[in-house]
Image (cartoon, grey):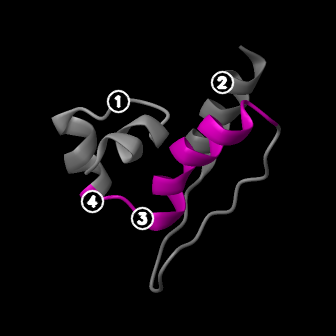
């Protein structure tokens, strides 16, 4: 990666982050890039499940509500 590409990255990437990036869905990988470009703004989340699935979002929704309130 050239010097110009390193400067374009909004945040330094640790080995952990590189490992995580290889195992994370593209939808979430781009979040860092988008926040770095546009700042902290209101968003709408979409949850995608592959079938068959049992979807139990209560804990996630409660966490999001607490995080938003903070």
Residue 25 at x, y percent in the picture: 42, 64
Look at discs 2 and 1 and give the one toward the viewer: 1
Look at discs 2 and 4 and give the one toward the viewer: 4
Report if the CB atoms under discs 1 and 4 are less than 8 Å apart.
no
Q: Is residue 19 magenta?
A: no
Q: Could you say which disc has been placed on residue 12 in the image?
A: 1
Q: Nearer the viewer, residue 34 or 55?
A: 34
Of labels 2 and 4, earlier in sequence is: 4
Looking at the image, residue 44 lies above or below residue 48? above
Q: Residue at x 47, y 81 (%)?
A: 50
Q: CA distance from mark 3 to mark 1?
A: 20 Å
Q: Residue at x 77, y 19 (%)?
A: 69
Q: Which residue is mark 2?
A: 67
Q: Which residue is mark 4?
A: 23
Report if the CB atoms under discs 3 and 4 are less than 8 Å apart.
no
Looking at the image, residue 66 lies above or below residue 33? above
Looking at the image, residue 19 lies above or below residue 70? below
Q: Residue at x 55, y 57 (%)?
A: 56
Q: Residue furthest top?
A: 70
Q: CA distance from mark 1 to mark 4?
A: 18 Å
Residue 21 at x, y percent in the picture: 31, 53
Q: Which residue is mark 3?
A: 25
Q: CA distance from mark 3 to mark 4?
A: 7 Å
Of labels 1 and 4, earlier in sequence is: 1
Q: CA distance from mark 2 to mark 4?
A: 24 Å
Of labels 3 and 1, earlier in sequence is: 1
**With 2 as the anchor, is 35 left or right in this view?**
right
- Please report the bounds of the magenta region as a residue range: 22-41
Q: Crowding at label 4, few (<14), some or many (≥20) Cα neighbours within 10 Å?
A: few
């Amino acid at each position: 990666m050239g010097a110009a590409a390193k400067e374009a990255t909004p945040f330094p990437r640790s080995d952990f982050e590189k490992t995580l990036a290889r195992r994370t869905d593209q939808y979430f990988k781009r979040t860092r890039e988008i926040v770095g470009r546009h700042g902290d703004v209101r968003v709408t989340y979409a949850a995608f499940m592959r079938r068959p699935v049992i979807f139990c979002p209560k804990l996630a929704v409660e966490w999001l509500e607490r995080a938003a309130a903070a």
